[in-house]
Image (cartoon, grey):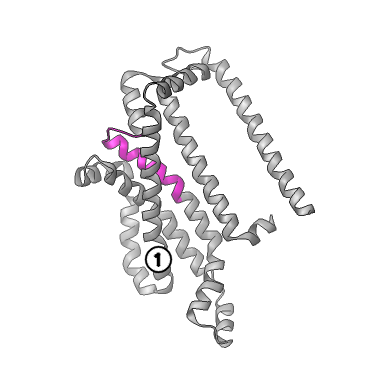
């Protein structure tokens, strides 16, 4: 009971802190914006009016929001389904690791901004190229963390389970996975956030819809309030993804939540 009260108190404290910082940020933003024209730095009120205008005129903002959200989410899932199994193979087979890791490092060294136009040319201006870019960006942190997490398994504990007659399946699910989960979730959290960046970079390279397209379009028309609306929407996607992973992490690793 006491632990629940302490946990509730901490969450309530974090909520109050976030609200306080948000109010302070709005006040500072309003004061600073009063010294500049709206095409340089619009006020929160001007951004709110632009947001309302987008909602009332066919609700186009929701369409752009959904496109970027799907590109980032599907790209992340594709990257995770590729990176996590591969990370286990690399961690357990050193020869395969020595063969594949240089290729992975070489691809990772190429800036995604330089690679995105090529993927758009190959796969078109539709959603497919954006999903691939988001998957590519999210792939590397999940692969790296997966390999590190699996290799953190204590070999003495593994040998003990073998002596006790545990099967490879039991060792995997009862030792290797629980040991690797904290590190893997770190990579998953990073990969999910980066997938949003990948989707936006893809939209910059060529798209007709999406929040990245809105920013690109608004830049050409000096519609700075629209840029702020798109940026706030992107921030909302990122925060939503972060909270989703936090809830999933608490459900999968309840012992970590109790340690807090």
Label 1 crowd (10 A; few <14 / some 14-19 / many >=20):
few
Quarter that holds the C terminus: bottom right
205 relative to 250 in the view: left or right: left
Position of residue 106 in the picture relative to residue 138 (left or right): left
Relative image position of residue 77 (x, y in whole percent): 40, 53
The reply to whether residue 143 is visible in this rendering is yes
Q: 90 left or right of 175? A: left
Q: Tell me residue 134's x, y (percent).
A: 36, 47
Above or below, comparing residue 29 to residue 117 in the picture: above
Residue 122 lies, in percent from the top left, at 20, 47
Residue 202 highlighted magenta (yes or no): yes
Q: Residue at x 31, y 35 (%)?
A: 204
Q: Is residue 137 visible?
A: no
Helix, strand or loop at label 1? It is helix
At which x and y percent is residue 83?
Answer: 39, 60
Part of the protein shown in magenta: 191-210
Rendered image quadrant of residue 91: bottom left
At x 55%, y 17%, the residue is: 32
Q: Is 59 in front, or is 214?
A: 59
Report which residue position mark 1 lands on: 85
* Dominant SS in magenta: helix
Give whichever of 113, 228 is nearer the camera: 228
């Amino acid at each position: 009971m006491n632990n629940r009260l302490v946990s509730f108190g901490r969450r309530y404290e974090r909520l109050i802190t976030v609200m306080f910082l948000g109010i302070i940020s709005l006040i500072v933003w309003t004061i600073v914006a009063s010294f500049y024209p709206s095409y340089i730095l619009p006020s929160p009120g001007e951004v709110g009016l632009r947001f309302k205008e987008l909602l009332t005129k066919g609700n186009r903002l929701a369409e752009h929001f959904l496109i970027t959200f799907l590109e980032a989410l599907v790209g992340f899932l594709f990257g995770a389904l590729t990176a996590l199994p591969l990370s286990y193979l690399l961690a357990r087979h050193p020869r395969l690791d020595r063969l594949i890791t240089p290729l992975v490092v070489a691809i990772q060294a190429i800036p995604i901004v330089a690679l995105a136009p090529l993927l758009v040319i190959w796969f078109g201006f539709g959603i497919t190229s954006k999903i691939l870019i988001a998957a590519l960006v999210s792939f590397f942190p999940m692969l790296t963390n997966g390999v590190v997490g699996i290799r953190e398994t204590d070999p003495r504990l593994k040998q003990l389970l073998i002596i006790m007659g545990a099967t490879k399946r039991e060792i995997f699910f009862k030792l290797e996975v629980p040991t690797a989960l904290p590190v893997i979730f770190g990579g998953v959290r990073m990969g999910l956030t980066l997938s949003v960046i990948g989707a936006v970079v893809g939209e910059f390279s060529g798209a007709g819809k999406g929040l990245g397209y809105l920013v690109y379009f608004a830049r050409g028309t000096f519609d700075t309030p629209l840029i702020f609306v798109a940026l706030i929407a992107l921030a909302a996607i990122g925060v939503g993804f972060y909270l989703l992973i936090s809830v999933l992490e608490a459900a999968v690793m309840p012992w970590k939540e109790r340690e807090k």
